[in-house]
Image (spheres, grey):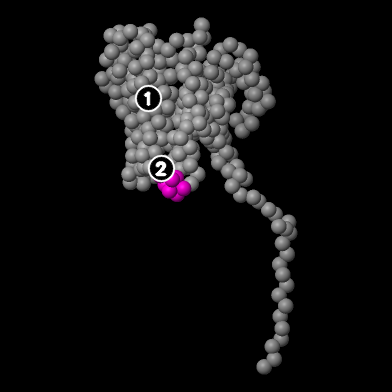
């Protein structure tokens, strides 16, 4: 309404374009895939009350590691082996980058929110450096993109759609992490440390080692988001490969209450927001910044609602009348 658009009409167009067209469903599931990975990455660290704000940078470093591998070994390895090793390289790239704030937190007690956030800009700048330099495709008319990967380095798709196997991998990792958190000793230690660090320390948990491990795993999952986006959609690394997937993963995790299974639903919801923004751009010429506005409103609403779960509000009196002070005459 603020920009002169009728909301109900816009919602109707969004619903029709997303849920009643084949392309809408494809785009929805394609954007849901990296959001599941980044949301799971943030949620996993949050189980230990560690705030990984660096999923965006870990996303980029995952793409960097796998692209380096492809550019050196493409067409030298069998197709099945190449794509598996690309996945492993993305895990290593994101995991090593995520272990930096984990090490600083465990060894020196440095606030992980600051370090993981600032490392996002370092990772994005490093990827840009490679794209504008050694990795730029000579046949791209100076566009900051690499050469296209061979077919062996591309994830398979479902039929003639853009939905790729990264979606299945995301569901597998959601199931794995749900099993780890609630069925294994490691998951119990993670949840215990998040709820009561003193009790965890008393029971023999090495909190420093666990902090480093959780951050490394969290970064590895965010790196998989980069793997799915590059090898499943673009088939090459290019500038601005992420449209804020890492930052949106924070909202996905918060909406899911940091539960791995809840990440699936919240990722689906946030993918609707992303696709809706594209529809609004096409139909009404609105800028992409509208989606960031929606995300900000959602995040602040979720954060603000925490007060109702942490505190109980009671209204003692609707009207407060000042008391009349009685004065006495004092005789001397």
Image location of residue 276, percent across then percent down: 57, 23
Image location of residue 141, percent across then percent down: 32, 13
- For the point 60% across and 17% down, the residue is 18
Toward the viewer: 262 or 298? 262
Q: Main secondary structure of the magenta part?
A: helix
Apparent side of residue 224 relative to residue 162 in the rendered image (left or right): left
Image location of residue 218, percent across then percent down: 42, 31
Q: Which residues are magenta?
A: 197-204
Q: Are dots 1 and 2 in contact, CB under 8 Å? A: no
Q: Residue furthest bottom?
A: 332
- For the point 28% across and 13% down, the residue is 73
- For the point 51% across and 29% down, the residue is 178
* Category of crowding for the residue at label 2, using alpha-carbon neighbours closer than 10 angstroms: few (below 14), some (14–19), many (at least 20): some
| Vertical side of 163 occupied by 290: above or below | below
The residue pinned by badge 1 equals 91
Q: Which quadrant of the figure has residue 87?
A: top left
Toward the viewer: 120 or 277? 120
Q: Which of the labelled discs sits on residue 205, or is there none?
A: 2
């Amino acid at each position: 309404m603020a920009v002169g658009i009728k909301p109900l009409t816009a919602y109707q167009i969004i619903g029709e374009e997303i849920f009643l067209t084949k392309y809408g469903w494809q785009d929805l599931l394609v954007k849901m895939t990296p959001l599941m990975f980044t949301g799971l990455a943030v949620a996993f660290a949050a189980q230990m009350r560690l705030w990984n704000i660096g999923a965006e940078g870990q996303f980029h470093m995952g793409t960097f590691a796998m692209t380096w591998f492809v550019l050196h070994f493409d067409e030298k390895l069998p197709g099945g082996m190449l794509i598996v090793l690309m996945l492993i390289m993305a895990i290593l790239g994101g995991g090593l980058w995520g272990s930096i704030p984990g090490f600083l937190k465990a060894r020196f007690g440095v606030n992980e929110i600051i370090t993981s956030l600032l490392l996002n800009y370092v990772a994005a700048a490093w990827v840009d450096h490679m794209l504008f330099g050694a990795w730029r495709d000579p046949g791209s008319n100076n566009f900051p993109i690499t050469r296209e990967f061979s077919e062996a380095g591309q994830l398979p798709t479902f039929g003639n759609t853009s939905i790729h196997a990264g979606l299945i991998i995301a569901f597998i990792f959601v199931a794995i992490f749900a099993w780890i958190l609630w069925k294994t000793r490691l998951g119990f230690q993670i949840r215990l440390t998040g709820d009561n660090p003193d009790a965890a320390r008393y029971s023999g948990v090495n909190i420093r080692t666990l902090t480093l491990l959780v951050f490394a795993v969290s970064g590895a999952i965010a790196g998989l988001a980069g793997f799915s986006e590059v090898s499943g959609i673009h088939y090459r690394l290019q500038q601005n490969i992420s449209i804020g997937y890492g930052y949106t993963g924070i909202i996905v995790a918060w909406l899911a209450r940091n539960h791995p299974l809840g990440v699936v639903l919240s990722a689906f919801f946030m993918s609707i927001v992303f696709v809706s923004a594209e529809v609004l751009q096409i139909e009404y010429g609105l800028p992409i910044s509208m989606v960031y506005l929606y995300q900000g409103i959602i995040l602040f609403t979720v954060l603000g609602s925490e007060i109702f779960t942490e505190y109980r509000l009671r209204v003692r009196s609707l009207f407060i009348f000042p008391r009349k002070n009685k004065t006495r005459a004092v005789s001397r």
